[in-house]
Image (cartoon, helix red, strand yellow):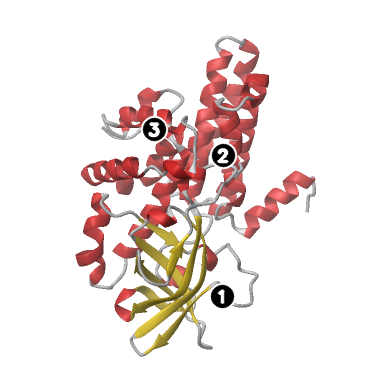
Amino acid sequence: MPMDHRRFPFCLDFITHFSTDMEDWVARLRAEGASPQSLTHFPAGSIRRLAQWERHTDIHRSHSLPFYVALAYGNLSLAFIMTQRHAAIRRIETSSNPRSIAEWLPAILSGDAFTTVGISHLTTSRRHLTVPPVTVVWDGDRGTLHGSIPWVTGAAHARYLVVGAVDASDSGQQYLILIETPSEGIQPGPGMQLVALTNSCTDVVELRGARIDRRDVLHGPSENVMAASNTGGAGGLQTSALALGLAASAIDYLAHESSMRPALSEHAGNLRSQWERLYDAIVDSESSRDANTLRKEANDLVLAATHASLSAAKGAGYVEGHPVGRWCQEALFFLVWSCPQVVADAHLCTFSGWQS
């Protein structure tokens, strides 16, 4: 059935436009997302089941942005983890390294091996440091990795990591390298206690002379390996799609409450209209809208929608365990995760009331 891009999860019936199985998936994910999140609840089983379902349907490739919206509507933490998995897969699949397809991809695509990325230091994180956070030292075809990879999602649960590194010589060339864990010199953290999405087990991976060779290089050398490999950088539309999914949950709640409190109807309708316009702009492959502009608008909407749902829930929403309180915490994620500086600056202007 062709997908109708003009409606979405304000009623679960629309989810079936993705697949007859998708409604069941979203219902299950919403139940899982409502559970308390902790470092001991990394959703390995859900990742494996979803990976197998994706491989069968190929839906994450053919309709990736609406798919991310649907996942985030179901469970933002799992959706976030899957974007990191997909980011790693894209970089493996687009590599000219013959090992990519033959040795690494089968176990990854089947869900038997979880993979993730450690590349934020090439785009948004720790860019102010004079020494690159992750360096590679080459000795012929052999190399060693040194440094700290920040913000690696599912670090302790990954068999494969796609890592960004800068040549330690004066050349400053960049690489994307695949490393396998556990291996000597690779020490992933168990995960940090975050304001939200703690069960994503996002943490630093320490590299202390981890050994690699040229056969592990996916992309590079290049002055800007993210651009040269055509795999994108910060501020991509995937993160904006996640924001739309979370916003849909909040608007859904507000619309439900308006059935009992008519005074809320206009507010729910206004937020839904904004959501639909932004959804069309984000999923439209022909759109000329700038990705950073769309990211700012998606962030604004998810912050507004979640706070509106909290206002409607009143004190009950401020009690631990209520979904709207969790949504407000989760919305803060979009202010910090892979947020390009131009978007962060725009938010500061909005929050401070400054206008150019």
Q: Which residue is mark 3?
A: 29
- Disc nearer the start of the sequence (2/1): 1
Left or right position of 295 against 20: right
Secondary structure beneath label 1: loop
Quadrant of residue 21 in the image?
Answer: top left
Q: How many residues crowd mark 1 within 10 Å: few (<14), some (14–19), many (20+)?
A: some
- Disc nearer the start of the sequence (3/1): 3
Instruction: Give the x, y percent position of residue 170.
Output: 53, 88
Most foreground residue, 299 or 54: 54
Question: How many numbered callouts?
Answer: 3
Q: Which residue is mark 2?
A: 330
Question: What residue type is disc 2 on?
Answer: Glu
Q: Are marks 2 and 1 in contact (CB under 8 Å)?
A: no
**Separation of residues labelled 3 and 1 (CA atoms):** 38 Å
- Disc nearer the start of the sequence (3/2): 3
Question: What residue type is disc 1 on?
Answer: Pro
Q: Is residue 32 above or below residue 313?
A: below
Q: Which residue is mark 1?
A: 132
* Residue shown at the point (58%, 14%) measured from the top left: 258
Instruction: Give the x, y percent position of residue 271.
Output: 59, 28
Q: How many residues crowd mark 3 within 10 Å: few (<14), some (14–19), many (20+)?
A: many
Question: What residue type is disc 3 on?
Answer: Leu
Query: Which quadrant holds the N terminus?
Result: top left
Secondary structure beneath label 3: helix
* Residue shown at the point (31%, 27%) measured from the top left: 24
* Residue shown at the point (61%, 11%) measured from the top left: 262
Q: Are marks 3 and 1 in contact (CB under 8 Å)?
A: no
* Residue shown at the point (35%, 77%) measured from the top left: 212
